[in-house]
Amino acid sequence: MRRKSYSTLILILLYAFTNVNCIIRPDTKLNPSQGQNSHLEVNISVNDFNTLDAEDTNIPLDREDKITFITISAAGDCTLGSDNSFGYSGSFVEEADKNGYEYFFRNVKDIFSKDDLTIVNLETTLTNATKKAEKKFRFKGSPEYTNILKEGHIEAVNIANNHIYDYLQKGYDDTIAALKKSDIGYFGYSNKYITEVKGVKIGCLGYEGWSNSSSLRKTIENDINSLKKDNVKLVIVSFHWGNERDNYPNDTQKKLGRHVIDCGADLVLGHHPHVIQGIEEYKGKNIVYSLGNFSFGGNRNPTDKDTFIFQQTFMFRHSQLIDSRRIELIPCSVSSVKNRNNFQPTPLREEAAISILKRIKKYSLF
C-alpha cells in the first residue's frame, strides 16, 4: 500500500475485534459489521519501510539502516487508593485486600506488557500519613500499592496533579520514596524521567496546566531544552489541566499543548477532566487532551465509565526520529462490570468500543 501524507494517515485501530486488525479512518462511517470482515494493514515494519514516501520522512532509507520501533502506551487517572470518608465497603482498598495487587490491571496488562513504555497519571498519595490537606477529597493508598503498577507493567507515572499533596509534604515524600523503592519512574514539577529504550533516550515531563502563564511556558521551554542537551530523542509532556466533566479542551489546554510542541515535544498527554476529550494533530504531533479515568479509586460508580488507552509507535533511524504516524486507540471501560466501578479497566468490543471511537472523533472536531 502506498503511504500518503501524514494528515491522511492518522488512523484509529479498533481493538474491539481481537481476531482482526480493524483500522478505521477518521472519515469512515463506523459500522459494527465492518470490523468482522475488513482488514487494512498500515503497520510500518522493517520489511516494508522502503514503501514510505521520501517526502514523508525527508530521509532516504536503505536496507542497511538501523530501524527501531518504540511503542508508547498512555492511560488516564489512576487513584490507587481512596478517600477515608468513602468507607471501606466497595472501595479500592477493599478490592485490593480481597483480590491482591494483580487484580486491577489484569485485563489490560497484556497490552502494557507488549509495549516499550507505559505511562499513567498517579492521582493519589502512597503513604501512611494521617495529617490531611484542607480540601474536599484527600486520596491515599498503601505504599505497597506500587506493586499494582509493577503487576500491571506500568513503568512511569506523572505526579504533577492536584492530589499528590493530599497528605501534605510527608504524603508527597512517602509517595516518591515508595516509587523509588519499587523502581517505578516518576515525573512532574521539577522531576524529569529519562529512560533508554532500544538505545533511544526518552524523556518525560509533567505539569499542572491551569493557566497559560509566561513563567510556566518558559519553564517548559527550558525543561525541554535541558532534555535535548542530554541527548533525549523522544520528549513526552504530561499535563493535568482542563475543566472537570468537560469533553472539549479549553483555550489554556490548546495554547499550552501547542506551545510544548513548538518547544520540541513529540507527544502531549492530558488528564484531570475525568472524562475523555479529543485528540489534535498539530505540526505532525499529537495532543491527547484527556485520557479520562482509568483505575480510579476516587469514584465508586462514575456515570461516565468510558476511557481509552492511547498508543503511538515511533520509528527511529540510527536513534533519530523519522516517523510517528501509527496511533492506536483501545476503547475501554474503567470497570469490568456495569453496575459499579470495580477499578478494573477492561477493553471493550463491538458497539461499546465503536461508541467511544465516535465520541473521540466528535470531541476532536473543535
Image (spheres, rainbow, N blue to C red):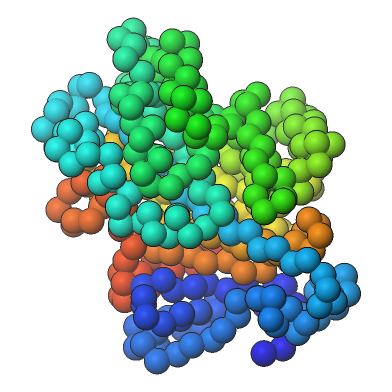
The residue furthest top is 131
Q: Is residue 349 left or right of residue 300?
A: right
* Residue visible at 36% across and 56% down in the picture: 108
Residue 22 image offset from top left, x and y in percent: 46, 81
User: Which quadrant would the C terminus be assigned to in this image?
Assistant: bottom right
Q: Residue at coordinates 15% horizontally, 26% vertically from top-left?
A: 87
Q: Relative to the observer, which residue lies in front, 25 or 322?
A: 322
Is 181 rendered above or below residue 194? above
Give the image quarter of residue 167: top left
* Most foreground residue, 140 or 117: 117
Q: From the top left corner, tell me how far across and down residue 292 is, in percent.
A: 42, 48
Quadrant of res 150? top left
Does residue 176 lie above or below 67 as drawn? above
Query: Image quadrant for the N terminus?
Result: bottom right
Q: Residue furthest front?
A: 64
What residue lies at 29% left-to-right and 30% top-to-bottom?
Answer: 81
Rendered residue at 75%/61% (across/down): 316
Farthest residue, direction left: 89
Q: Is residue 207 left or right of residue 349?
A: right
The answer, for residue 38, to whether it is visible in the render is yes
Q: Is residue 215 left or right of residue 96?
A: right
Above or below 335: residue 206: above
Tally of marks:
0
In the figure, is residue 199 to the left or right of 77?
Answer: right
Residue 55: image location, x then y, percent: 85, 76
Where residue 302 sits in the image (x, y, percent)? 26, 46
Query: Relative to residue 334, is residue 21 depicted above or below?
Result: below
Q: Is residue 271 visible?
A: no
